[in-house]
Amino acid sequence: MGRTVLKVDNLKMWYKTKMGYVRAVDGISFELKEGESLGIVGESGCGKTSVSMTILRLLPENAEFKGGHIFFDDGNGSVDLVSLPEDEMRKYRWKGISMIFQAAMNSLNPVYKVGDQIVEAMLNHFPDMSIDEAREKVAQLFQLVGLDPKRMDQYPHQYSGGMKQRAIIAMALSCDPKLIIADEPTTALDVIVQDRILKEMKKIQQKLNMAMIYISHDIAVIAEVSDKIAVMYAGKFVEFADSVTIFKNPAHPYTYGLMHAFPSVVGPKTELTTIPGEPPNLLNPPKGCRFAPRCPLATDECREREPEYREIEPGHWLACHHPIERGKEVKFDEK
Amino acid sequence: MKSDDIVLRIENLRKLFPAERKIFGKVKLFVHAVDGVSYEIKRGESLALVGESGCGKTTTGKILVGLYEPTSGRVIMEGQDVTPYLFENQKGAERYIKEQYLEKFKNPPSLTDDFDKNMYDLYEKFGKNDSKFINHFLKDRKKKMIEIRRKVQMIFQDPYESLNPRMTIFDIVAEPLNIHDIGTAKEREDMVAQLLEEVGLSPAETFMFRFPHELSGGQRQRVAIARALILNPSFVVADEPTSMLDVSIRTGIMKLMMRLAQEHGMSYLYITHDLAVARYMANRIVVMYLGKVVEMGDIEEVLQHPLHPYTKALLAAIPVPDPEYKRGEPDIKGSVAKPINPPPRCRFYDRCPLAGRECEKLPHPDLIEISKDHWVACHVVTGEVKGK
């Protein structure tokens, strides 16, 4: 594989509130190479959307960087996005890193033609481009995402939900980004439409050799699109590995619980796992391991000392004092 | 089978919504949200109603709890025709009785259905007097409406919106008791406390006098479940009760609902778009497409051996939580259309990969039982038409 596009190093971003700091992103590290796709899976409030917003620096005023670096390399040398002034940062957004937001299809302006909206975004980033050139490019992008280029001159209300989402993907690709971040782009869609969009995204990502971060709470969707998976819990990555390892040999009890909590339509009907309790409040996360209060394997050590995030075998990172051995079963206390 | 063993029977249920607004003249365009749907739920059994958004599954649920009036069709609950009580005003109920029974009674030999025959006996008892027969249904109508609503409860999708933020948990769960005037204050408190414990909000005293905003999503959904169960309903319409919850919380709610169904001998009409969740929550499944039932039967049988091309496509499109699993390509064209005055042919015709030439001319196919408790509505699958 090629060059490293993104290197996140011990990134910390907290939100300041009246009650104290919410530790949404609390010491996250990972690397992403060209053509790789990383899935970040976690429950609501675990900080997965904050990670993407931090990378793009699209943060509210109460957000504060508490340390770490985001090295981004678009082919012209690596820069640390954290220390970049805002006007420099703007050049990287959309051109270097683009994003497909949750419910992005509602972000199309209803009174402009869809094609014109994409052309406008392109002209903003490439002032030298002529309108005809831009329209030509948009027509190509429409074909790439499986939309009829004739639809460029239609308005958003003439599109179905799936078509709007395709247009948004075309828009995200319009400035040839090196990295694309997709935050639950298919959650609002029906399964058949979702299936088409997922396949399209995977195809385009491989064809253009882009790096992709795919964020979702749905591990089945993550399994479809990602080569590597990061499992996030309470502001931290607890496990990181290639997708087969995460699914077949999860070492963290939380990963194990998530994998076994998901019903499937194929294969035998297995017993589903329930993880007791609720995710912690990030205003005041528990001392020691943040999963300890819900973990069936937790010991006093877990409650006292935070486990280190370390590489347990090549490419497999873990933060746990008591990793699950291969093939072992874990029983969660259901009460 | 005794009719008592069937908790709910829906016959040819239809609901049309006007698709245009007119000040003068008749509305001619209608959205056929539910268009001739029939199925039944046996006691202790749960039925999953699945399909994509806009297929009419939520509309069906809302008709059953009395939130929408049916356009036509009959709903029988525990051996009693409750349709007259699903109408907001008396006129609708009267019209229904005339259309459903009195029209048919003009020609008694045509009655084939046992239920209709029983009704005819009743009609004879009233000396074949139309107004006496109608009155039999309409007297105490309000009282009967309340009784029906007691038997059917609903759990909504979004626990952040279905609980009144200004009421305490106790008030929320006890409100059905107030409305139906059950028990003394002390008894109500005991009932609520016991039920809160049962749904896993324990100890109950610590939850009773808190407000919804103090609870998490999973806890709120437990409150919604307790509120639905406090009247001991015969069946519960559950409209995607777990789709807003996180994975680690969701299985807890699913298991709780299954346990309660067993303990209280109650049935669910479980409305969901997620076939995997349906598999865990129900014994039988009804797959809907644009207001019509396309496939129905034992859930494992339907999921393992789907017959209708739409069910097959739905199943093939579901992501599987296994990166090594290679699923097939969903074989389906185009996208869902709105069922506004749809042509009489098969609803799935425009998207169907199997459709033969004759499918265009034939009316929408009937549900046919292919094997034991496995029904499908498709001209090609049943062999009536040669497909592609």
Image (cartoon, coloured by chain):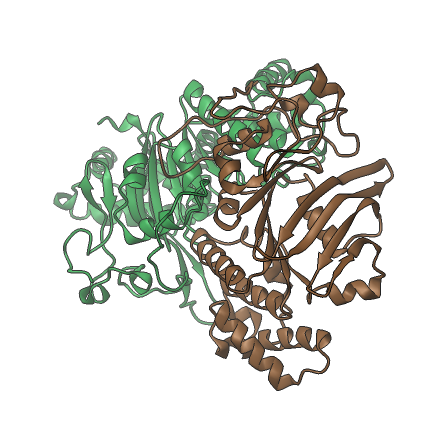
Chain colours: A brown, B green
Q: Is residue B292 visible?
A: no
Looking at the rendering, in which quadrant would you find the N terminus of chain B? top left
Q: Depth check: give the residue in front, B305 or B378.
A: B305
Q: Position of residue A308 (x, y in %)?
A: 71, 30
Q: Residue at x 77, y 55 (%)?
A: A57
Looking at the rendering, in which quadrant would you find the C terminus of chain B? bottom left
Horizontally, is B6 left or right of B190 in the view? left
Q: Position of residue A273 (x, y in %)?
A: 50, 26
Horizontally, is A312 left or right of B345 in the view? right
Horizontally, is A256 left or right of A263 in the view? right
Q: Is residue B71 above or below residue A153?
A: above
Q: Residue furthest left?
A: B109
Q: Residue at x 51, y 30 (%)?
A: B251
Q: Is residue B179 above or below residue B271?
A: above
Q: Residue at x 44, y 29 (%)?
A: B151
Q: Depth check: give the residue in front, A141 or B213.
A: A141
Q: Quadrant of residue B305?
A: top left
Q: Position of residue B39 (x, y in %)?
A: 30, 40
Q: Is residue A226 visible?
A: yes
Q: Depth check: give the residue in front, B72 or B120.
A: B72
Horizontally, is B11 left or right of A293 in the view? left
Picture mark count: 0
Q: Position of residue A52 (x, y in %)?
A: 69, 51
Q: Is residue B20 above or below residue B297?
A: below
